[in-house]
Image (tube, coloured by chain):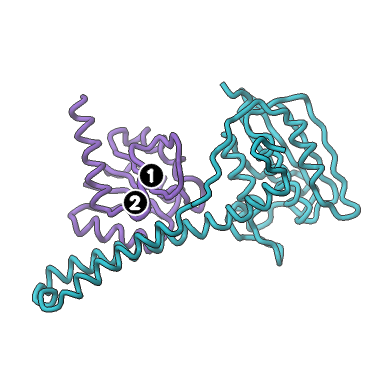
Amino acid sequence: MNVLLVDDDAAVRLTFGALLEDDGHVVIEAASVGAARDHLRDDYQLAVVDLHLPDGDGTRLIPEIRAVRPDAVIVLMTGDDVAASGADLVVAKHCPPSEVVARAEAVLAARRAGA
Amino acid sequence: MAADGFDLPTLHRMMIVWEATSVLRHDLRNKLASVRNAAFFLQRRVETEAPALVAADARIGTFFGMIRSEADAAVALIADRVPRPVPEPREVDLTNVVAEAIGHLRRPDGVEVSAASERVNGAGDHLELSLATLCLLENAVEAGARSIHVVCRSSEGDGALIEVIDDGPGLGDAADRAFEHFFSTKPGHLGLGLPMAKRLADRSGGSVALHAVADGGVRAVITLPRSTA
C-alpha cells in the first residue's frame, strides 16, 4: 500500500514511516497542508493526516483528497475530540502504524463488500 | 453570564490555561508516539538480527515492552481531564457580543474604540464569541492601534461577520505565523490571543482571518454561520 503521511513533526514522520516501510509499504511524506497539496495527485491508497498542521487544520485536506483520490482511505490522527471530520477513521497519535493499516484495510474490505 | 456560571473574565483565564495545555499535550503526544514507534522498530530489528541476544537476556524484551507501556501510560496521564464541551449553537445577537467584548477591553489612554452594527444574528455561543472578539481587540491594542472600529454585518451567502479594523502597523513579515501558539512579535506577550480567537470561532462553526488594510492596519474578521438550522 502507498501511504500519504502528513505530519509536521519530523520524528513522527520518521518513526511512523519507518514502521510502514518495514512492513513493505511506500511512504509519501508531507509536513504541512501546503506540502501535502503537492502530493494529492500521487498514487496512494491510504492518507494519514495529522489534525494540527502549521498552516491549517488537517481536516481541510479531506475534501481535497476525496476529490482526486476518492478510493483512498483517509485517517485523521489526533488526541482531540473531533466531530464530523469527514475522515474514514480517527485514531489517536500513539496508535501503532500496523493497526492503522489494518483498520484501513478493513474499511477497504467493507467498501468492496458493499459495492 | 453563561448558563454554566462563567463570566467573560473567568472564561478568558480558563481559555488561556486550556489553550496552553492543549498545545503542550499535543506536542507531548507527538514525542511519546515517536518514542513508542522507535522502540517497536528497534525491537523488531533486534529480534530479527540478533535473536540469540534477545534469548540470552529476557530483560531486553521486557525493557522494549516497558518503553511502549510507559509511553502509553504517559499519554493517558496527559489526557484532557477537564474538557470543555462545544456549546450548543444558538442564535446570538452579534451587537450584544461586540458590546460585551468592548466593555471588557482594557485600553490605554488615547485609544478610541467605536462600533457600528446592523442588527444581525450569528450562530454560536454568546460568551465564547465575545471572548473571541475581545482577543481580536486586545491584539489590535497590543499592536499599537490608536483607533479601532468594530462592525457586525451580514456577509455574502448565509453568513455573519464581526470585523475588528485597526490603524496599527499592519500584518508585518510574520503574518503567516499570526495564529501560531506562543508566537508574538511583542516582547513579554504570551502569543495565545489569536489562536484562542480561532479556536473559539471554530467551536461556533466559524473562522477567523486577518487581512491587511490599504492604508495600514489590520482587518480581523470572525465569519459565522447565520442560522443554527
Q: Quadrant of the C terminus of chain A?
A: top left
- Residue B212 is situated, as x and y percent measured from the top left of the image, at 70, 46
Q: Which residue is mark 2?
A: A5
Q: Quadrant of residue B42?
A: bottom left
- Residue B217 is situated, as x and y percent measured from the top left of the image, at 76, 48
Pick the front one: B148 or B92: B92
Pick the front one: B17 or A27: B17
Q: Chain of mark 2?
A: A
Rendered purple, the chain in question is A
Q: Chain of mark 1?
A: A
Camera-side mark, 1 or 2: 1
Determine which of the numbered discs, if any, sits on residue A76 in the image.
1
Counting residues from the N terminus, which is met first, the one under dot 1 or under dot 2?
2
- Residue at the far top in the pictured view: B229
Residue at screen point 60% across, 38% down = B207
Crowding at mark 1 (Cα within 10 Å: few <14, some 14-19, many 20+) = many
Determine which of the numbered discs, if any, sits on residue B216 in the image.
none
- Residue at the far front in the pictured view: B5
Residue at screen point 68% across, 34% down = B126
Rendered cyan, the chain in question is B
Mark 1, secondary structure of its residue: strand
- Residue B62 is situated, as x and y percent measured from the top left of the image, at 21, 70
- Residue B37 is situated, as x and y percent measured from the top left of the image, at 29, 62
Q: Please determine whether, in this image, residue B95 is positioned above or below residue B168.
A: above
Crowding at mark 2 (Cα within 10 Å: few <14, some 14-19, many 20+) = many
Residue at screen point 33% across, 40% down = A89
Q: Please determine whether, in this image, residue B86 is positioned above or below residue B173.
A: above
Mark 2, secondary structure of its residue: strand
Q: Are marks 1 and 2 on the same chain?
A: yes
Q: Please determine whether, in this image, residue B122 is positioned above or below residue B32.
A: above
